[in-house]
Image (spheres, grey):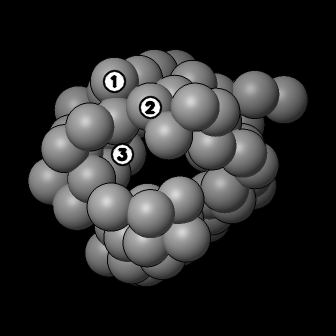
Amino acid sequence: MTSEQIKQNIEKALDEIRPFLQSDGGDISLISIDNDTSVKVRLEGACVGCSVNQMTLKSGVEMTIKKYVPQIEEVISVD
């Protein structure tokens, strides 16, 4: 998978997740992809102060991204 395909698939994964985040007043943005294995995202809106945002990141966002791009090893939230 090329770097461009990886980016496109990550965007597809985020598009799948986004409606759930938006229904709670939040959102998510792709910040960067490092070495085609590490993804940095920014949680926005209500997700910023949410007490379960790390659980959402790991069990929702990371799992969905890995479904689209299996070689992704980690998803990191940045401010």
User: Which one is earlier in the sequence, the residue at label 3 or at label 1?
Assistant: 3
Residue type, numbered disc 2: Thr
Estimate the spatial distance between the alpha carbons at disc 1 and disc 2, rounded to whole Å: 5 Å
Q: Do the residues labelled 1 and 2 touch (CB within 8 Å)?
A: yes
**Residue 19 placement (x, y as % from top left):** 41, 78
Residue type, numbered disc 3: Val
Give the mark toward the camera: 3 or 2. Answer: 2
Residue at the spot of label 1: 73
| Residue nearer the viewer, 19 or 15 | 15
**Residue 9 placement (x, y as % from top left):** 38, 70
Q: In this view, does 6 lie above or below 76?
A: below
Q: Are marks 3 and 1 in contact (CB under 8 Å)?
A: no
Drawn side of residue 75 relative to residue 67, left or right? right
Q: Which residue is depicted at the point 66% across and 56% down?
A: 30
Mark 3 surroundings within 10 Å by alpha-carbon count, few (fewer than 14), some (14 through 19), many (20 or more): many
Residue at the spot of label 3: 61
Secondary element at tag 3:
helix
Mark 2 surroundings within 10 Å by alpha-carbon count, few (fewer than 14), some (14 through 19), many (20 or more): some
**Residue 73 placement (x, y as % from top left):** 34, 24
Q: Can residue 64 be seen in this view?
A: no
Q: Which residue is depicted at the point 75% across and 49% down?
A: 31
Residue at the spot of label 2: 37
User: Which one is earlier in the sequence, the residue at label 3 or at label 2?
Assistant: 2
